[in-house]
Image: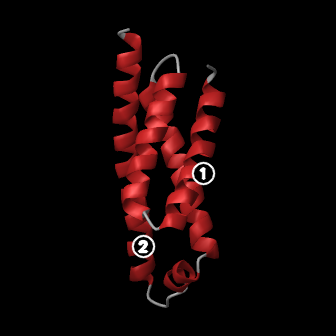
Amino acid sequence: MKTEKVIITGIIFGLVLFSIFSFLGFDLWGGVIAAIFIGMTVGWLTDNNPMRYTIISVSSYNLIAWTLRALFDPDAQFVLGYEHKSITVLFIGFIIIMIVFYSIIGSFSAFVTYSLRKNK
């Protein structure tokens, strides 16, 4: 499948999973499960180098989702509007660490899926 279609598919599927798991209240484990599903999907659909496309997809959908959440969630607006900048930096740092963590998990699942598909 073409690279653009794989990345768009991963981003849209990730946004859907992120919103479902956010609605259900599974923020941390929902992110891990979503990263694994995105990695499996991208590893299955792509023809070469699934780890790169998974990292791009997972990073993109997490950035979009966390930005939208920060804009529309009252708790996140409270943190971002707080007068001490250290709390805002801590919040943004936590988001960046979670994006890296989810990208690593997703790229590992993409590698495993791609290797199993290739070995058949």
Could you tell me residue 57's position as x and y percent? 53, 41
Could you tell me residue 105's position as x and y percent? 34, 42
Residue extending farthest bottom? 83
Instruction: Name which residue lies at 35% across and 18% down.
Output: 115
Secondary element at tag 2: helix
Residue extending farthest top? 120
Q: Is residue 31 left or right of residue 77?
A: left
Amino acid tagged 1: Val
Could you tell me residue 89's position as x and y percent? 42, 74
Q: Could you tell me if residue 100 is visible in this image?
A: no
Q: Which residue is mark 2?
A: 91
Q: Is residue 85 above or below residue 50?
A: below
- Quick one: label 2, few (<14), some, or many (20+) residues within 10 Å? some
Q: Is residue 25 above or below residue 107?
A: below
Q: Which residue is mark 1?
A: 16
Q: Is residue 107 left or right of residue 16?
A: left
Mark closer to the chain start, 1 or 2: 1
Secondary element at tag 1: helix
- Quick one: label 1, few (<14), some, or many (20+) residues within 10 Å? some
Could you tell me residue 81's position as x and y percent? 55, 85
> What whole-number distance in Å separates the C-alpha atoms at marks 1 and 2?
23 Å
Residue extending farthest front? 24
Q: Could you tell me if residue 118 is visible in this image?
A: yes
Amino acid tagged 2: Phe
Instruction: Name which residue lies at 46% across and 26% down.
Output: 43
Q: Which dot, 1 or 2, sits closer to the camera?
A: 1
